[in-house]
């Protein structure tokens, strides 16, 4: 493991993404990627009395699913990295409280899935044989915490995004035949003063562009090195901004770039405005769709960059701007 440039780490023995699993809610099950998810739910409650308990159950069941798919039993997992959007990451901690596995609770907002892959890769390179990385989010619990309770029926702005209900999880291992995480690029906090909590794409796009360009500068690669450059989750608004910022810095990413918030929903048929968001957005799109594309060798090189808005309801109410963060993993087969 060695540092390249200012923000990138290259692995001497790249960890394998051994297996992935995904569970999504009913709206996601009606979207264009439905066939790629391992399990889809009929309703948002999942047999629980509250949205928060439902989210925690989704995460727990998805981790059980990943353990079964990977063939790696719980007692062979060295540590778990998991996080979500709820205060103090209660979905992750409550969902994993019976696992009896060393646990790192992490928060990077919607960047949490790739943050987990970054940290998990470092562990796999150094001391761990198997590392589990997981995230979750839930439309109803997120609306309740960050915006307005659903019962109020508030109108959503055109720039708003729809929080994905679901969970994505990946098992990293020292052994295996790929796909491999070959590099990680650790993001910096970027804040250009956006204050609109209903326009996350605009708030996070500068952080995406900063990490993207840092990755290219550190590695000497260009956009065409990758079959796909995937962000998660800028939505339609943020995606366009990201393309423009990258172009202004001399990087044309338009031909091989897409966003998980754009991919997971049908904008016109599902009325999701600017697309999907939430910790589970990039988690489920990668674990359900992109991982299968890698395993089938339809794509061989992906630069996965997850973006997060580092704010909460209190900071928004106090008039603060929205800092953004983006972390990247280079995944190659």
Image (cartoon, rainbow, N blue to C red):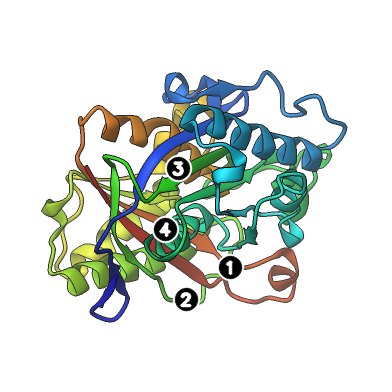
Q: Is residue 142 visible?
A: yes
Where's residue 187, x and y in %?
A: 40, 71
Disc 3 and disc 1 in contact, CB within 8 angstroms: no
Residue drawn where x is 73% and y is 64% of the image? 313
Mark 1 and mark 2 residues within 8 Å of each other at the beta carbon: yes
- Sequence-first disc among 2 and 3: 2
Q: Nearer the viewer, mark 4 or mark 2?
A: 4
Check disc 4: other Cα within 10 Å, few if <14, some if 14-19, many if 20+.
many
In this orientation, does residue 166 appear? no
Check the picture and name the quadrant holding the N terminus.
bottom left
Mark 4 vs 2, N-terminal side = 4
Among the two numbered marks 3 and 1 on one chain, the one whose residue lies closer to the N terminus: 3
Classify mark 1: residues with Cα within 10 Å, few (<14), some (14-19) or many (20+).
Answer: many
Distance from Cα at disc 2 to Cα at disc 3? 21 Å
Task: Assign a secondary structure to mark 4.
Answer: helix
Q: Mark 2 — residue?
A: 189
**Residue matched to label 1:** 310
* Residue depicted at 71% across the width and 22% down the height: 43
Earlier residue among tags 4 and 3: 4
Q: Residue at x 42, y 61 (%)?
A: 118
State the CA–CA distance, disc 4 to disc 1.
27 Å
Neighbor class of circle 2 (other Cα within 10 Å; few <14, some 14-19, many 20+) is: some
Reply above or below: 180 against 107.
above
Mark 3, residues whose alpha carbon is within 10 Å: few (<14), some, or many (≥20)? Answer: many
Q: Residue at x 58, y 69 (%)?
A: 195
Going from the N terminus, do you reach mark 1 or mark 2 first? Answer: 2
Q: Of the numbered discs in the image, which one, if any, rests on residue 124? A: 4
Q: Which quarter of the rendered picture does the C terminus lie within?
A: top left
């Amino acid at each position: 493991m060695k540092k390249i440039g200012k923000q990138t780490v290259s692995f001497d023995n790249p960890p394998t993404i051994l297996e992935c699993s995904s569970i999504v809610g009913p709206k996601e099950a009606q979207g264009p990627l439905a066939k790629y998810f391992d399990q889809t739910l009929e309703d948002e409650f999942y047999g629980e009395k509250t949205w928060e308990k439902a989210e925690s159950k989704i995460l727990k069941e998805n981790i059980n699913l990943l353990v079964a798919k990977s063939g790696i039993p719980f007692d062979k997992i060295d540590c778990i990295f998991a996080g979500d959007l709820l205060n103090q990451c209660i979905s992750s901690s409550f969902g994993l409280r019976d696992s009896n596995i060393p646990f790192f609770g992490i928060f990077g907002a919607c960047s949490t899935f790739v943050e987990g892959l970054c940290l998990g890769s470092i562990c796999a390179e150094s001391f761990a044989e198997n590392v589990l990385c997981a995230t979750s989010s839930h439309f109803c619990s997120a609306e309740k915490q960050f915006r307005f309770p659903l019962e109020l029926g508030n109108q959503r702005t055109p720039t708003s995004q729809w929080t994905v209900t679901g969970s994505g999880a990946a098992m990293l291992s020292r052994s295996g035949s790929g796909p491999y995480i070959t590099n990680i690029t650790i993001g910096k906090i970027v804040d250009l003063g956006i204050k609109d909590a209903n326009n996350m794409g605009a708030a996070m796009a500068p952080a995406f562009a900063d990490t993207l360009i840092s990755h290219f500068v550190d590695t000497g690669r260009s956009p065409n090195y990758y079959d796909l450059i995937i962000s998660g989750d800028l939505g339609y608004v943020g995606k366009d901004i990201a393309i423009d910022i990258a172009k202004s810095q001399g990087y044309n990413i338009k031909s091989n770039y897409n966003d998980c918030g754009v991919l997971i929903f049908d904008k016109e048929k599902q009325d999701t405005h600017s697309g999907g968001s939430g910790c589970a957005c990039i988690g489920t799109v990668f674990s359900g769709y992109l991982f299968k594309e890698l395993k089938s060798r339809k794509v061989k090189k992906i630069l996965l960059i997850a973006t997060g808005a580092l704010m909460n309801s209190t900071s928004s109410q106090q008039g603060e701007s929205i800092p953004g963060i983006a972390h990247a993993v280079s995944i190659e087969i």
